[in-house]
């Protein structure tokens, strides 16, 4: 309760130094009359967000509104978002540091967080985005996947939901916010190296009506969005929905989505991998990724088996042909020992 009671006082004191706060945490903006103008609360260059610098009849200093997204808040929110903080105690600590207030009584040690914004598109920014997102159960991500025929959502801890994920169509366009599916891209040790965003329609019925519906950030080469822990056998493909569709039929096989044909061709192999199933898409890029990955796997002493859809990809097979047809098509393409290993477990 002590931290919460401090919040109002901290916000008031920050408001007395609103311009100094803006110059420190929102240095991508500039003063315009009695307001500080910037792109958004994460310190993106632009002009849609206004921070009141002096108390007026409309409200106290430090209050802000983003005309583009409709978001609003105070300077504690500015500190939280611009620094990429998630714990309120860290926000209070950062505010106290800025105001040079006496330090509170020592508290149990917590994980130290960076107090400066992570470079846009970096692996650190990807980690922070994933940390700020929430599990997908009961969210629009679950709704979206079910609309794609995907109901087997076990082992999907690397997927999360962000209700207002920033989207910018180009370097000069205004910032928008849309709900999004956030996927953690990890290396072979499970460390997050990047993130993938799929912007969703407000009701989760499909993707958002924007020009670029998916974007990745961070270090992606060799990494992937992973479902399950790979052992001697795993499957790898391009898209998240494609891989999750294959998991509908083979739910206990570890799988990985490399996010593009080029990254699929370069995916790294776990040390104990002995057989790799290449989940291909029926297009020229998919064919090229298949050939490159098969060649690399064979050179590493790994048996590579290609899994081909009937239609364009396995998600289209699932939606248009149904789960029974998808399972029948995949079963005849598996090695006999894997039919015994994975099919009986799925039955």
Image (tube, helix red, strand yellow):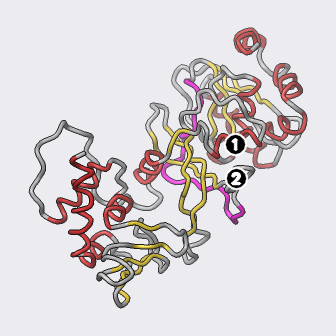
Question: Along the horizontal axis of the image, is 99 left or right of 202?
Answer: left
Q: CA distance from mark 1 to mark 2?
A: 8 Å
Mark 1–mark 2 CB contact (< 8 Å): yes
Residue at 57% x, 67% y: name it. 176
Which quadrant would residue 125 be assigned to in this image?
A: bottom left
> Residue 143: which numbered mark, if any?
1
Residue at the bottom extreme of this rendering: 33
Q: Which residues are magenta?
A: 209-229
Q: Position of residue 274 (x, y in %)?
A: 62, 19
Question: Along the horizontal axis of the image, is 181 left or right of 84?
Answer: right
Above or below, 315 relative to 262: above
Residue at 49% x, 32% y: name it. 188
Above or below, 326 relative to 124: above
SS label for mark 1:
helix
Q: Mark 2 packing: few (<14 Cα in 10 Å), some, or many (20+)?
A: few
Residue at 74% x, 27% y: name it. 248
Locate the N terminus and report the quarter of the image it occupies: top left
Which residue is disc 2 drawn over? 203
N-term-proximal mark, 1 vs 2: 1
- Residue 218 in the magenta stretch? The answer is yes
Q: Position of residue 43 (x, y in %)?
A: 40, 69
Q: Position of residue 329 (x, y in %)?
A: 87, 25
């Amino acid at each position: 309760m002590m931290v919460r009671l401090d919040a109002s006082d901290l916000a008031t004191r920050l408001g007395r130094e609103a311009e100094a706060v803006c110059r420190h945490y929102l240095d991508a903006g500039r003063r315009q009359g009695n307001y500080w103008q910037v792109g958004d609360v994460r310190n993106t260059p632009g002009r849609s967000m206004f921070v009141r610098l002096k108390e007026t009849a409309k409200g106290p200093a430090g209050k802000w509104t983003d005309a583009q997204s409709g978001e609003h808040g105070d300077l504690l929110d500015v500190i939280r978002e611009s620094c990429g903080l998630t714990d309120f105690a860290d926000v209070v600590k950062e505010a106290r540091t800025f105001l040079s207030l006496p330090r509170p009584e020592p508290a149990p040690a917590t994980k130290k967080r960076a107090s400066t914004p992570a470079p846009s598109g970096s692996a650190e920014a990807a980690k922070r985005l994933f940390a700020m997102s929430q599990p997908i159960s009961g969210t629009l991500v679950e709704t979206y996947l079910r609309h794609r025929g995907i109901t087997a959502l076990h082992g999907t801890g690397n997927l999360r939901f962000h209700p207002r994920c920033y989207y910018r169509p180009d370097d000069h366009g205004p910032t928008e916010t849309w709900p999004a599916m956030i996927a953690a891209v990890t290396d072979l040790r499970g460390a997050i190296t990047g993130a993938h965003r799929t912007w969703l329609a407000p009701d989760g019925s499909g993707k958002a009506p924007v020009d670029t519906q998916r974007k990745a950030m961070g270090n992606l080469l060799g990494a992937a969005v992973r479902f399950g822990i790979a052992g001697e056998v795993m499957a790898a493909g391009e898209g998240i929905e494609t891989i999750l569709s294959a998991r509908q039929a083979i739910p206990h096989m570890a799988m990985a989505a490399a996010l593009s044909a080029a990254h699929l061709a370069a995916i790294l192999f776990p040390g104990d991998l002995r057989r790799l199933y290449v989940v291909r898409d029926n297009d020229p890029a998919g064919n090229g990724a298949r050939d490159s990955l098969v060649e690399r796997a064979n050179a590493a002493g790994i048996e590579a088996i290609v899994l081909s859809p009937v239609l364009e990809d396995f998600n289209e097979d699932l939606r248009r042909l149904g789960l029974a047809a998808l399972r029948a098509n995949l079963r005849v393409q598996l090695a006999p020992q894997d039919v015994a290993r994975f099919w009986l477990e799925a039955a």
